[in-house]
Amino acid sequence: MDAAFAKTNALFCKPFDNSGILFEVSSANGKISFRSLDLSTDLDTIYHWVNQQYATEFWQMNGSKEVLKQTYLGILDNPAAHSFIALLDDLPVGQVDLYLVEADELAAHVNSELNDCGLHLLMLPPKQSKKDLSKDVLQSFISFFFSHLEAGKLYAEPDSRNAMANLLAKRSGFNFLRAIELSSKTANLYCIERNSIHQ
């Protein structure tokens, strides 16, 4: 990424440090909150999740814990991206990567504007989850994103073969745009805007 671009287009909601709850909301499943990913406490959890069968096919991050650590260090050090942990009643249940579209290959597929972002969502194993928890977490993150007045459009680009992720995007309010070819997958592109949700 170009250094000048990163300096002038840093992610608007990137926290200055990894301490504290950034957003909190109530859901049918309990209190959902978000904080920054902290590799000193979260790495083992994420490593466990990405090595489960439900995640290996689509996340392709299974393998060495050190490689995983370096991947997330890269995200946390990136001015145009950040990684968040979703908590249910203070226990980790999900992880969200947020990135500026203009700093990503997605920029070649959309007419993006300043502060348009894309996201990736990783949830805990389904057997440990609760009914509609993934939907609650994603909708809560959407509320977190749009709680920032600077926020532009929010995109999701799940693998076209990932039926559960595509269904989740639709159920959470994203509008399907089209299929696109990314470097690592054929993705279905979704978008949600501030004026299409109820604040």
Image (cartoon, helix red, strand yellow):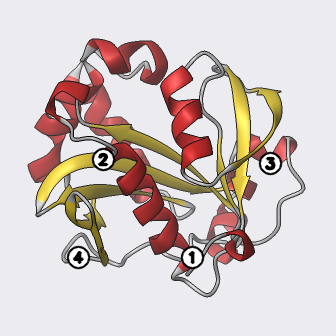
Graded by Cα atoms within 10 Å as few (under 14), some (14 to 19) or many (20 or more), the crowding at tag 1 reads some
Q: Amino acid at mark 1?
A: Phe
Residue at the image point whose x is 37% and y is 15% from the top? 56
Please report contact status of discs 2 and 1: CB closer than 8 Å, yes or no: no
Q: Does the image show residue 27? A: yes
- From the viewer's perspective, is the residue at label 4 or at label 2 nearer? 2
- From the viewer's perspective, is the residue at label 4 or at label 1 nearer? 1
Residue pointed to by mark 2:
133
Name which of mark 3 and mark 4 comes first in the sequence: 4
Name which of mark 2 and mark 1 comes first in the sequence: 2
Name which of mark 3 and mark 1 comes first in the sequence: 3
Graded by Cα atoms within 10 Å as few (under 14), some (14 to 19) or many (20 or more), the crowding at tag 4 reads some
Residue pointed to by mark 4:
21
- SS type, badge 4: loop
Name which of mark 4 and mark 1 comes first in the sequence: 4
Residue pointed to by mark 3:
107
Residue at the image point whose x is 11% and y is 63% from the top? 90
Q: Position of residue 13 (x, y in %)?
A: 49, 75
Graded by Cα atoms within 10 Å as few (under 14), some (14 to 19) or many (20 or more), the crowding at tag 2 reads many
Q: Is residue 124 left or right of residue 110?
A: left
**Which disc, if any, is residue 146?**
1
Marks 4 and 2 sit apart, C-alpha to C-alpha, by 19 Å
Residue at the image point whose x is 18% and y is 25% from the top? 127
Q: Against 182, is 86 above or below?
A: below
Q: Position of residue 183 (x, y in %)?
A: 70, 23
